Image: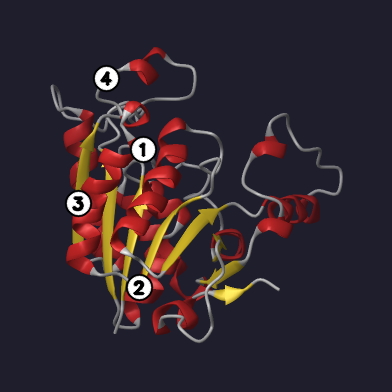
Amino acid sequence: MGTIVSFHAHPDDESIGSAGTLARAAAAGHRVVLVFATRGELGEPVPGVLEPGEPLSTRRSAECYESAAAIGAKRVEFLGYTDSGMIGEPSNEAPYCFWQADVEHAARRLAVILDEEEPDVLTAYDDNGGYGHPDHIQVHRVGRRAAELSAVPVVAQGTINRDWMLRGMKAQNPDFTPPPGMDTMGKPESEITHRVDAVDFVEQKRASMRAHASQMGPDHFLLSMPDPMFALGMGTEFYIVDPPVNPASAPELFEELFLPLR
């Protein structure tokens, strides 16, 4: 059996982007490890969820363990940086936020965990962090460098298949017009190399999302999707694997889970 380490910026990022992949890996007997750069203290809590005086970071940390249980992850770690907030916010300049972290130093923190786990695959994000969030971009940079330091065989950059998403929206509404900024979300299909079929694990993915109740209430647009739409929209996860993996030396875990897009 193999090991997959999944590196994320904030609690709940793992649920939306890679929970299906991780649940599938765990169900097949592989070891799944979650690593978070921050505890997401700058998120916006669902009204009424926090107890009086309860720090959001404490709640979100606990939610990570609930999410891990839902998808079958065996270890949860935090690198210890603070949430940088959205791009352009003053919080981006905080000295201990992840965005301000020295990439080499942060990569060495992650590499300690990678050296312990010796994963076959590390998941991170694409070079724009999916949608331009500073902490997500930093996950890309730190994840790739840490993989180099620890000689991880495969780095799979989680991303959004922009063309696939647009096709789905237009199928629902032929008059759909992409809103401003959608052209920078995710990557065009031509740049995406692999997909993971996680349709059989959408209930674990939904349970992982529900675990992050401080961020996603029952009326959240993803959680309120009808089951067939949720399976269609959330049951396939997309990745960029660059550089390509040599088929002769590809880890079994990678070959088992990650299907070439073309």
Circles 3 and 2 in contact, beta carbons < 8 Å: no
Residue to which mark 1 is pinned: 215
Q: Which of the pair 151/96 is nearer the observer?
A: 151
- Which quarter of the rendering shows the N terminus? bottom left
* Residue at left offset 29%, top offset 82%: 29
Q: Is residue 24 left or right of residue 94?
A: right
Q: Is residue 39 left or right of residue 129?
A: left
Which of discs 3 and 2 lies nearer the camera? The answer is: 2
- Amino acid type, residue under disc 2 in the picture: Asp
Bin the neighbour count of mark 2 within 10 Å (Cα to Cα): few under 14, some 14-19, many 20 and up: many
Picture coordinates of residue 105 (x, y %)?
26, 39
Distance Cα–Cα, label 3 vs label 4: 21 Å
Picture coordinates of residue 213 (x, y %)?
31, 43
Residue to which mark 4 is pinned: 95
Relative to 47, does residue 68 appear above or below in the rendering?
Answer: below
**SS type, badge 3:** strand
**SS type, badge 2:** loop
* Residue at left offset 37%, top offset 57%: 148
Q: Quadrant of residue 216?
A: top left
**SS type, badge 1:** loop
Q: Earlier in the sequence, mark 3 or mark 4?
A: 3
Bin the neighbour count of mark 1 within 10 Å (Cα to Cα): few under 14, some 14-19, many 20 and up: many
Which of discs 1 and 4 lies nearer the camera? The answer is: 4
Residue to which mark 3 is pinned: 77
**SS type, badge 4:** loop
Picture coordinates of residue 6 (x, y %)?
35, 58
